[in-house]
């Protein structure tokens, strides 16, 4: 069975795609974004996949890829077009190549035009294709920089993408209106730049007169992406908290395991965000915990002591997860949630103060 997830970076309006083969547990990630590496790695971990490949549709001008970071974190190999001019990839792709993950594969189709190194990935059963900035939803990528060529893009779309089955779902690298997917049939009929009876000369004239602003991050993004996202300055790497063996979840919460907390109670501050009757109720509370109900936390978070990291706890881990967001908003930098809360703590036989026998 194929697992598919579409992820979004709101800053650059970039889509990242995760495809996984549930039989083998192998997965690929298409167009990962540098700032979203924690999120994507968390999802891959929670789903139990091994990331085999980080794939690029092209050298992006509006964001920095997370390919190099994913290789450091998860051991994923990097692949992109041989025409991209990038260094540091584990595999340079050519038209007709296949990228395999478990029993599934992606066919590589060269689709130059937006850049000279653009490629489209087509799933083995031709049910979906990942078009990068070649075909976008009712549009196309610009062709005025990075060896862009409007006539080449027109030919790429007409011969390599519109030749796919009309039912094939197309997934672009970006969308700036919140649209998520389209199909070959839709774009052939409704794309105002490339569909219908529009000729190559029509498209070239249209693209020549777009007069688009320069991409804001191009001077940073292109050089970094030509290194497959490897930072030129190691200080730019996002630093993970190191005060405990924390885990970052796909929901965006830092968590710490109960066994570590029990062994390190003296070095942290436990913040119990339940109500007072729960604090003294049957589940009891963790030794030395400070009671501050969630409803009062936002108004008092700025006054909390900051001499120790804070671990938030509640009955089952939900309210305390929300509490970590409040702590972060208040400027507290060292915090974590206790997953499973007091229910898990008691179920694992850990020591409590008060509570039922």
Image (spheres, grey):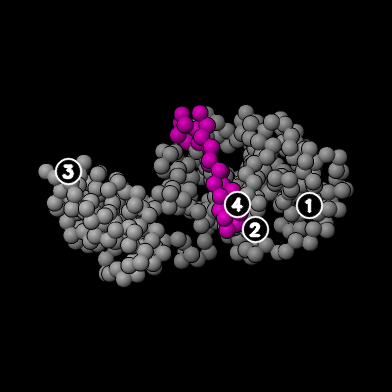
Residue marked by disc 3: 349
Magenta span of residues: 1-26
Q: Are marks 3 and 1 in contact (CB under 8 Å)?
A: no
Cα separation, mark 2 vs mark 4, equals 11 Å
Task: Locate residue 43 relative to residue 9 in the image: left or right.
Answer: left
On residue 149, the disc is 1
Q: What is the x, y in percent for residue 78?
A: 54, 47
On residue 61, the disc is 2
Q: Give the mark nearest the N terminus, 4 or 1.
A: 4
Q: Give the mark nearest the N terminus, 2 or 1.
A: 2
Secondary structure state at the residue bearing disc 2: loop
Cα separation, mark 2 vs mark 1, equals 16 Å
Task: Locate residue 21 relative to residue 162 in the image: left or right.
Answer: left
Q: Based on the picture, tell me whether residue 27 belongs to the magenta stretch.
A: no
Q: Looking at this view, is 8 or 243 the one in front?
A: 8
Q: Give the mark nearest the N terminus, 3 or 1.
A: 1
Residue 137 in sight in this render: yes
Position of the C terminus by quadrant: top left
Residue marked by disc 4: 14
Q: Give the mark nearest the N terminus, 4 or 3.
A: 4
Write the residue at 23% across / 51% down: 278
């Amino acid at each position: 069975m194929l697992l598919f997830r579409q992820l979004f970076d709101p800053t650059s309006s970039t889509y990242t795609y995760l495809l996984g083969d549930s039989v083998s547990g192998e997965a690929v990630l298409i167009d990962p974004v540098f700032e979203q590496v924690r999120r994507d790695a968390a999802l891959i971990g929670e789903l139990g996949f091994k990331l085999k490949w980080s794939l690029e549709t092209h050298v992006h001008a509006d964001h920095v890829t997370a390919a190099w970071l994913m290789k450091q974190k998860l051991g994923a190999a990097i692949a992109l077009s041989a025409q991209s001019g990038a260094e540091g990839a584990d595999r340079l792709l050519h038209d007709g190549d296949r990228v395999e993950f478990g029993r599934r594969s992606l066919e590589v189709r060269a689709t130059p035009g937006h850049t000279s190194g653009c490629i489209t990935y087509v799933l083995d059963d031709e049910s979906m294709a990942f078009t990068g900035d070649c075909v976008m939803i009712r549009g196309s990528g610009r062709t005025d920089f990075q060896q862009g060529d409007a006539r080449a893009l027109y030919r790429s779309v007409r011969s390599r993408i519109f030749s796919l089955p009309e039912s094939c779902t197309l997934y672009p690298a970006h969308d700036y209106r919140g649209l998520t997917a389209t199909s070959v049939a839709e774009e052939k009929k409704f794309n105002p730049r490339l569909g219908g009876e529009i000729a190559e000369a029509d498209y070239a004239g249209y693209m020549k007169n777009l007069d688009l602003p320069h991409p804001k991050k191009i001077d940073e993004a292109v050089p970094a992406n030509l290194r497959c996202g490897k930072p030129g300055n190691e200080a730019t790497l996002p630093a993970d908290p190191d005060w405990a063996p924390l885990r970052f979840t796909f929901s965006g919460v830092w968590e710490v395991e109960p066994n570590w907390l029990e062994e390190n109670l003296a070095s942290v501050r436990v913040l119990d965000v339940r109500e007072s009757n729960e604090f003294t109720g049957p589940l009891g509370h963790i030794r030395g915990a400070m009671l501050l109900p969630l409803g009062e936390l936002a108004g008092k978070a700025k006054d909390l002591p900051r001499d120790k990291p804070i671990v938030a706890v509640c009955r089952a881990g939900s309210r305390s997860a929300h509490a970590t967001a409040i702590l972060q908003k208040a400027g507290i930098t060292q915090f974590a949630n206790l997953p499973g809360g007091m229910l898990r703590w008691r179920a694992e036989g850990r020591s409590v103060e008060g509570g039922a026998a």
